[in-house]
Image (spheres, rainbow, N blue to C red):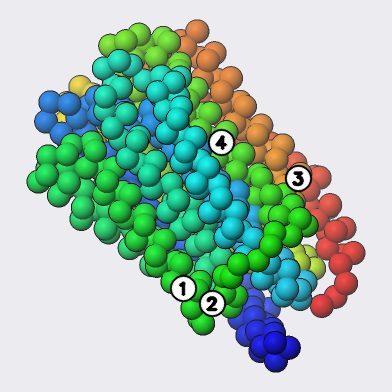
Amino acid sequence: MEYERKNQSQAVSSGYDRFDRTPISALVWKLGVPAMLAQFFNILYSIVDRAFVGHISGSGELALASIGVCAPILTAMTAFSSLIGIGGASAMSISVGERNNRNAEQALNNSAALLLAFSILLTLTALLIEKPLLFLLGCSEAMYPYARAYFRLYVLGTPAVLCGSGLNQFVLAWGNARRGMCAVMIGALVNTLLDPIFIYVFHLDIRGAAIATVIAQYCVLIYVGSFLLSDQALFRIRPERLNRQIVARIFGIGGLPFFIMLFDNLLVISLNAALRRYGGEILGDRYLSCATVVQSFMVLAFYPAQGITTGCGTLYSYHFGAGHYDKVMQVFQCVFLFCAGYMLLLTVLSQLIPEFFAGIFISDRETIRLAADCIRKYTLGLLGVAVQYAIVDGLTAMGQTRLALPISFFRKILYIVCVFLLPLFFSLESVFYSESISDIAGATVTVTVFFTAIRPKLRRKLDQKPAL
């Protein structure tokens, strides 16, 4: 046993040594690009489902709006994979930076047990309170048959979503960005191939989209699980009793991304509620379809940027654990520049060709025009999102959630305020400016707070760490 642990310690050290030897810019590129591409494939889940469903003859627009109503609940359930996956993977990387491989191993095993327990609990709870939840989120009587069919089938994939995506965070944390990308790519390709078969060939309509997604998610779980149970993994998953300190560390780090995802859901819910309240039954359904298109476009912005920060999260964690202040600051800078370049590209595309993207989901020309106008309003401040991702996700990966939480929630609270105030003074469409206003103001506050308050605190904390 002692010989085994010694070999494992050597393998872990050699796996992470390149973080000390390789320039930060090269590491950010090497880890960020595959993780970013993985999120592009992950995007295919929602985009492909919505694209095929939106073009179902006769009921596509209503079915598309129904998926938009279901989305906040499904995303809220997925947030638990971030709670445990990001929290556990960051705790593992920090422990490795501190040269404590036993704690790192426990972080993986405890996370696996927690993911399984939460997936079972959430599946049962969602099925029990499905109808009141859907109507609470803006579902109409006309939408309900479609929303119910999609939701009930999709929820059956919850164990695969939580365990597959949660455990994939550990694959990324070991620097295996390509393998992490392959996991997501497998699911996206399976979903893309099965969607048209179940929807059009088997005539299952919106139910077919849900079935295809569930099958794809279980394929991801099988791929990730087989790797983590193999000899290729730095730590292999095995049954182990929960350690209170490790669990507390997992929740402490993962709590912020978890609450951010829940709060992001609240943003979607707030937008849907405002559109339903001020748009009424008929106009509200049309604007909800537009909002679903807008949110689908924003997935293109948010997921790849999150992929960059997730892929590079192990750099933040490792160098924080090792007490390398200068390298932590280099990671902040390189990740921001990477995210900013991508957001700038998305901003240009959203202003020049939003009709192209809207046409992927809907066929009616008037609705396409309306959705394109909403996209333009919603994306004016995308560059500010790069600031949020680089700083907030970086602080989270280092376990500094108390520093990250205020600047993250400021932007989100401002968004909700704008959603309910703008329609009172301007047209209903003005509600789509809420995102741009909150992105620009949020970035301004974040940069100011980071340089005046957060950076000095990080320097003091890292200077106090013993040299390793």
173 and 467: which is toward the camera: 173
Q: Is residue 229 above or below residue 155?
A: below
Q: Residue at x 46, y 34 (%)?
A: 126
Q: Amino acid at mark 3?
A: Leu
Contact between labelled residues 2 and 4, with CB atoms less than 8 Å apart: no
Residue 168, given in percent of the width and then of the height, sits at 50, 62
Query: From mark 2 to mark 3, how far is it between C-alphas?
Result: 33 Å
Q: Compare marks 1 and 4 and give the one earlier in the sequence.
A: 1
Q: Is residue 263 above or below residue 139?
A: below
Residue identified by numbered label 1: 227
Residue identified by numbered label 3: 403
Q: Quadrant of residue 9?
A: bottom right
Residue identified by numbered label 2: 233
Q: Residue at x 49, y 78 (%)?
A: 230
Query: From mark 4 to mark 2, how far is it between C-alphas?
Result: 31 Å
Q: Compare marks 4 and 2 and give the one earlier in the sequence.
A: 2
Contact between labelled residues 2 and 1, with CB atoms less than 8 Å apart: yes
Disc number placed over residue 262 in the picture, else none? 4
Q: Amino acid at mark 4?
A: Leu
Circle 2 packing at 10 Å, graded few (<14), some (14-19), many (20+), is: some
Residue 387, given in percent of the width and then of the height, sits at 60, 46
Q: Residue at x 72, y 66 (%)?
A: 94
Query: From mark 1 to mark 4, how far is it between C-alphas?
Result: 30 Å
